[in-house]
Structure formats: C-alpha cells, structure tokens
Image (cartoon, grey):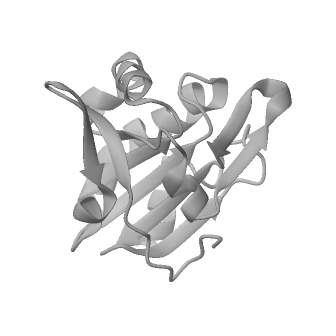
Amino acid sequence: MTLNVGDKLPDANLLRMGAEGPESVSLSSLLAGRNVVIFAVPAAFSGTCTTAHVPSYIRSKPALDQAGVDDVICIAVNDPFVMSAWAESTGAADAGLLMLSDAQSEFTKAVGMDFTAPPVGLINRSKRYGAYVVDGEVKILHIEENPGICDTSAGEAILEAIQG
C-alpha cells in the first residue's frame, strides 16, 4: 500500500514515553472521531527534521488548534527514548506536539512510506510527509520528493491546505 488521500490509516501500536517509561499507544485511538495532523520525519535529531520540520509545527500549532485540529503528531522510526529527548530539546513537548516512535517501522512500511539510504545510515526510515487526517481518513497528504527538504510537508503548508 502506498498512502493516498482517501485512505483509512491502519491501526498501529506506536510508542511514547510515559511516567513509568515506554508505553504503547494505539494510533486508531488517537484518530477516532478526531481531526489530526500527522507529520513524519526520516530521523530525530537530524538537520532538516530539527531545524525546519519540527519548528514549523511548533510555529503553526496555535493556528492549527484554531482551525479545529485536535492533535499534532510526529512519527519517526526512532526509539521512544530518542523521541522524548528530541521533543524536550526542540521544545516540541512544551508546544504540545505528540512525538511517537515507530521503532520497528511497522506503521511506516504498512503505509508505504519507508525508504532506505545506507550511505547515510538511514535504514527502513520514513519519508518526510505531512497529512491531515479526519476520523482516521487521509484528507490532505503532502509528501516531499527529497527527505532533506521540508516545504510542502511543513506546518504552514498543511495549515494553508486545511484552510483551503
């Protein structure tokens, strides 16, 4: 499956850091009956992800909230410890972004968004994209052609698309 507008997202058990350590969270429980923006990145702590993608959603979060978005979720093929540390270091946690780990790339592979780039050490990682999802159905999907670019998947671009 390659993710497209109109697709219903498959359920996936992703990981986040809880008070007692890593905990599983069902993606479908976060999407059911809700308007959610999901953005995915190739690697936490990497250049474009840290200096462009996450900051674009931190800047856009208040306007996304006003536009009726219930949650902004970042998904990366990293472990939950890395995602938590990255959320703290970027300010994503304070901004209210939900940083989820797809540690084994199961969700990323299920939606056909995986890629591998051995020369730079990226194995089974996620393509960079932004999506607006209503009750689990993809309504808007912006996939970057190059993982090093954050343009159409940035928070401002997704906000503009939502506002129509």
Q: Which percent across, then down, holds residue 130?
A: 53, 56
Report which quarter residue 98 is drawn in.
top left
Q: Residue at x 43, y 69 (%)?
A: 10
Report which quarter residue 80 is drawn in.
top left
Residue 13 in the image: above or below residue 142: above
Q: Nearer the viewer, residue 29 or 147?
A: 29
Q: Nearer the viewer, residue 132 or 112?
A: 112
Which residue appears farthest toward the right when viewing the image? 119
Q: Which percent across, then down, holds residue 115?
A: 73, 48
Q: Which percent across, then down, holds residue 49?
A: 58, 32
Q: Residue at x 56, y 67 (%)?
A: 141
Residue 144 in the image: above or below residue 112: above
Q: Is residue 159 left or right of residue 117?
A: left
Report which quarter residue 50 is drawn in.
top right
Q: Which percent across, then down, holds residue 26?
A: 28, 56
Which residue appears farthest toward the left when viewing the image? 19
Q: Nearer the viewer, residue 7 or 52?
A: 7
Q: Can you say which quadrant of the picture contains the N terminus?
A: bottom right
Residue 52 appears in the figure: yes
Residue 68 appears in the figure: no
Q: Residue at x 46, y 44 (%)?
A: 102
Total marks placed: 0
